């Protein structure tokens, strides 16, 4: 996750309280989604950004995960996401995300 | 719709740059600041590939054109441990340049003495570059003698210069150009000079591949992501011109187009529009490579025990030209664009770039044989977590097709395979963005293997922190419709437009009605002429000739330069034959024999341009005839084709008597222009008693080596039939491309030693009298001083030169003139009067 985004996530968590923040990811594949999820939960695994050593334990979902999909207006989802849903390996993403959440999410 | 621009050629180059990776790639420079002792930096050296490894790397061989994108499918993924067996430095598109030669090329491209190199390095590298097929002698001459390593190291530490490395050793440096301005810091200049040099390399290969004449390029567009300028104009730009200058595109201007990675696609659309609109005929779109992006994903590569694969700078150049009826067209009716209102979801982006333009053209996704979006090499991006970029794009296009009902969901992978390609381009931002396929696409379309390819450029504008907008444009390259050609053909079949002849006849002694009568006589025969009137009609006429509003002009007087004289055309009374009188006005040379030799050639040109295929030459029996004959025979012997006529008199010979003139024994009768002037007046007016010239074609066109206008002379006493004749004569000269014919004829004569033969004639006379007088500095001369004897005209000008007055010679309305500036008029007249040239 780039350094600027790490900084913004950290600031939001401080401002609104970590329990009130949900991070939504749009990564193109499982590994990248997992890394980003790890960053906002356990901390930056590359130890390069503001979240290095900072375990926020935030709730984090990929936009294609079923938990999030039900929250979104169907027409909007069809217009904005459905094409990518077809392209992405959603199962792989769900597996990666679930594993990270089970391990690190505190809320 | 026709007239689309075509892709006439393309080049793709790579530069092996391992020392730039280590020292100047931003991933490495940032790491050195943030984490100077990191394991990554320690592992860097051992993760660098050699030139041979980089050369044999399959994606690189595709980039150079030694393999095709399809060949890449035969290599099992990943590719970094695979090698192409017979890898070559040069491919049909370009080359992989070694780092040392590239550093030398940077110095060649340096216009401000910013690059200093070590002496031994220069010596070795110069030798290598000498063998480079495209680096010219004049480029090599820009390599400077090197300095000692000691001096180099001292300068670097004292003045914050950026060292240049080869094989990890210092071999030179780049200076800063300003002490405070970061835009001119040594680091920025190093990046910019490396960028410039790689772009220059791409241009050199494009010129070579496309065979375009360097002088024919009208416009160049640089489309990279680099910036040049100083602190007051950070993005001042025009990398384009800076690079085009290096390869001698002297007739081109240019500019830079920017849109992150989408830059090249934007630039090609702009270039195509410039060509299609007729603004320019040949536009080059090109870019060099980015130093900063070298080793960008190096950390991920090293972590996964993969060598650093981002170790080459890329470059490309594409020639966009007027439709030639052969090369693939850029169809500007199918242009996709991501607009400000489009939105940034992938779905919105792909729709705007792919399906919207296809919908507008009534096409389906599957009508496009190949798509080329971002052709990044997945070997580089996959280990870095960015996935297979081209594949992701193809899947998105296919998914959109499924949503639109043009594809079955199960066909997605087939679509990717059939309409997509494996990526082979280095991750240099603008370099992989659609354009790497243009070279292959052009070939595949020319070979009939595909019909349509869509090139898509996308850019991430948020990186500049000015907007969160995304960007992208796309265009379609397709088989040549050949419509442009047939349309041109239609025009030429339907209406053959006669050349337009302008007439200036202010001085006619016979009045305006006589001229109007002439025009209507000519029009009755199908010719076209217009009367140019008013003050400064001659100036207007010159302007119209220059702007090609008229194709030739007929006038009653004109200042031809010395060296140009007119070839008249008459109808001889004896047999009613046409004969050319070479020459009738103007001065071919101040020496009579020399002038007659030239006049013979002028006569041949005029006759041939009037449709006489093999004109015969006769020399009028006047003073100088024998010398002229001798010289012309020598010219003939040395290979210039002259057909000599035989006198009709019993004793024959090429020298013509008065009887031959009346009989028209020769097609071209050669004489000096004063005699010729007498003759043409006689031939034109012998039936009318002299005041009205009633027969023939007038005094003819001014001809001389390098003279580039068709201006014909008639006289103030020329009657309507003669002026009409002159219009006919002019029309024939235009139609038979007289100027080109003249250039060819002079070239032939010069190859046969014309200059030496003429010099031989001159020496005879002037060896003793000529004193070398150098002309003073050239200035604009507008004042004519008339009244000087033709034979003295050159000496008169030299007399003025000797007094420090710049003067030129020419033919004025009333005869020879010396031309000087307004400021010098009075003094020049005084000098010439004193010297006896004028009264």
Image (cartoon, rainbow, N blue to C red):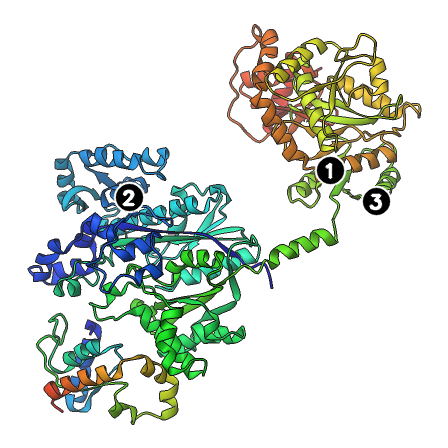
Using a 10 Å C-alpha cutoff, classify the residue at mark 2 as few (fewer than 14 neighbours), some (14 to 19) or many (20 or more): many
Lateral position of residue A10 relative to residue B496, left or right: left
- Kindly identify which chain the residue marked by label 2 belongs to: B
Residue in view at x 62 percent, y 55 percent: B485
Residue in view at x 78 percent, y 32 percent: B556
Residue A77 is situated, as x and y percent measured from the top left of the image, at 35, 88
Can you say which quadrant of the picture contains the N terminus of chain B?
Answer: bottom right
Using a 10 Å C-alpha cutoff, classify the residue at mark 1 as few (fewer than 14 neighbours), some (14 to 19) or many (20 or more): many
Q: Which mark is residue B523?
A: 3
For marks 1 and 2, give the CA distance. Answer: 52 Å
Identify the residue under disc 1. B553
- Kindly identify which chain the residue marked by label 3 belongs to: B
Callout in the foreground (3, 1): 3
**SS label for mark 1:** strand
Lateral position of residue B408 relative to residue B590, left or right: left
Decide: marks 1, 2 in contact (CB < 8 A)? no
Q: Quadrant of residue B500?
A: top right
Residue B363 is situated, as x and y percent measured from the top left of the image, at 51, 74
């Amino acid at each position: 996750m780039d350094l600027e985004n790490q900084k913004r996530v950290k600031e939001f968590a401080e401002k609104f309280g970590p329990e009130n923040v949900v991070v939504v990811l749009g990564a193109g594949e499982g590994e990248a989604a997992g890394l980003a999820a790890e960053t906002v939960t356990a901390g930056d695994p590359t130890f390069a950004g503001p979240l290095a050593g900072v375990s926020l334990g935030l709730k984090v979902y990929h936009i294609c995960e079923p938990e999030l999909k039900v929250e979104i207006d169907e027409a909007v989802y069809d217009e904005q996401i459905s094409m990518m849903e077809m392209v992405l390996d959603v199962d792989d993403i769900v597996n990666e995300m679930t594993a990270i959440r089970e391990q690190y999410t505190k809320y | 719709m026709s007239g689309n621009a075509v892709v006439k050629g393309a080049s793709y180059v790579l530069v092996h740059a391992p020392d730039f990776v280590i020292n100047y790639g931003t991933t490495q420079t940032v790491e050195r600041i943030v984490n100077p002792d990191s394991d990554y930096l320690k592992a860097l050296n051992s993760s660098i590939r050699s030139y041979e490894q980089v050369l044999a790397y399959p994606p690189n061989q595709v980039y150079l054109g030694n393999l095709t994108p399809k060949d890449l499918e035969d290599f099992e993924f990943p590719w970094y441990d695979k090698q192409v067996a017979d890898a070559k430095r040069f491919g049909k598109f370009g080359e992989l340049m070694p780092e040392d030669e590239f550093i030398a090329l940077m110095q060649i491209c340096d216009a401000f003495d910013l690059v200093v190199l070590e002496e031994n390095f220069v010596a070795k590298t110069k030798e290598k570059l000498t063998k480079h097929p495209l680096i010219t002698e004049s480029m090599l001459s820009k390599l400077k003698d090197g300095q000692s390593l000691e001096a180099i190291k001292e300068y670097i530490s004292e003045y914050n210069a950026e060292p240049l490395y080869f094989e990890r050793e210092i071999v030179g440096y780049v200076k800063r150009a300003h002490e405070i301005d970061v835009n001119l810091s040594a680091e920025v200049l190093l990046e910019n000079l490396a960028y410039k040099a790689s772009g220059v390399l791409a241009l050199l290969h494009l010129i070579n591949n496309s065979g375009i004449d360097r002088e024919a390029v009208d416009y160049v567009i640089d489309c990279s992501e680099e910036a040049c300028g100083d602190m007051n104009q950070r993005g001042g730009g025009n990398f384009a011109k800076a690079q085009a200058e290096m390869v001698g595109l002297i007739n081109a201007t240019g500019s830079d187009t920017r849109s992150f990675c989408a830059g090249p696609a934007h630039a090609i659309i702009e270039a195509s529009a410039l060509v299609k609109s007729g603004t320019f005929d040949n536009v080059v779109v090109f870019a060099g490579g980015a130093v900063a992006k070298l080793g960008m994903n190096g950390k991920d590569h090293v972590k996964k025990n993969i060598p650093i694969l981002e170790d080459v700078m890329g470059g490309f150049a594409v020639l966009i030209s007027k439709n030639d009826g052969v090369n693939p067209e850029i169809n500007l009716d199918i242009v996709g664009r991501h607009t400000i209102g489009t939105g940034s979801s992938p779905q919105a982006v792909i729709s705007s770039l792919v399906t919207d333009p296809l919908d507008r053209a009534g096409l389906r996704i599957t009508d496009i044989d190949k798509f080329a979006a971002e052709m990044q090499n997945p070997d580089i991006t996959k280990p870095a977590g960015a996935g297979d970029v081209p594949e992701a794009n193809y899947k998105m296009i296919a998914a959109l097709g499924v949503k639109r009902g043009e594809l079955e969901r199960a066909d997605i992978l087939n679509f990717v395979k059939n309409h997509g390609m494996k990526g082979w381009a280095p991750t240099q931002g603008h370099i992989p963005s659609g354009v790497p396929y243009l070279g292959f696409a052009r070939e595949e379309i020319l070979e009939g293997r595909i019909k349509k390819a869509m090139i898509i450029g996308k850019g991430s504008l948020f990186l500049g922190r000015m907007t969160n907008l995304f960007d992208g444009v796309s265009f379609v390259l397709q088989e040549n419709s050949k419509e442009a050609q047939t349309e041109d053909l239609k025009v030429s079949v339907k209406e053959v437009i006669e050349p337009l002849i302008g007439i200036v006849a202010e001085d006619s002694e016979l009045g305006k009605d006589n001229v109007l009568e002439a025009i209507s006589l000519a029009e009755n025969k199908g010719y076209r002429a217009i009367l140019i009137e008013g003050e400064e009609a001659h100036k207007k006429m010159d302007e119209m000739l220059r702007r090609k509003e008229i194709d030739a002009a007929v006038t009653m007087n004109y200042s031809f330069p010395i060296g140009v004289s007119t070839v008249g055309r008459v109808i001889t009374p004896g047999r009613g034959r046409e004969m050319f009188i070479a020459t009738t006005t103007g001065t071919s040379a101040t020496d009579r024999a020399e002038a007659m030799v030239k006049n013979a050639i002028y006569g041949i040109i005029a006759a041939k341009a009037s449709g006489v295929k093999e004109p015969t030459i006769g020399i009028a029996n006047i003073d100088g005839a024998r010398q002229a004959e001798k010289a012309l025979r020598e010219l003939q012997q040395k290979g210039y084709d002259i057909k000599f006529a035989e006198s009709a008199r019993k004793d024959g010979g090429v020298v013509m008597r008065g009887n031959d003139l009346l009989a028209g024994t020769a097609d071209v009768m050669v004489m000096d222009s004063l005699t010729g002037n007498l003759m043409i007046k006689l031939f034109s007016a012998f039936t009318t008693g002299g005041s009205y010239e009633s027969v023939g074609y007038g005094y003819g066109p001014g001809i001389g080596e390098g003279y580039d206008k068709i201006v014909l002379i008639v006289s103030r006493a020329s009657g309507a039939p003669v002026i009409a004749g002159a219009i006919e004569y002019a029309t024939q000269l235009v139609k038979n491309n007289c100027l080109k014919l003249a250039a060819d004829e002079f070239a032939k004569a010069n190859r046969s030693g014309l200059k030496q033969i003429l010099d031989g004639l001159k020496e005879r006379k002037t060896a003793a009298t000529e004193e070398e007088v150098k002309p003073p500095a050239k200035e604009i001369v507008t004042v004519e001083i008339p009244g000087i004897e033709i034979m003295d005209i050159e000496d008169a000008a030299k007399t003025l030169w000797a007094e420090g007055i710049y003067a030129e010679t020419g033919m004025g309305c009333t005869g020879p003139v010396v031309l000087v500036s307004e400021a010098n008029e009075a003094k020049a007249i005084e000098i010439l009067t004193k010297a006896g040239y004028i009264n």
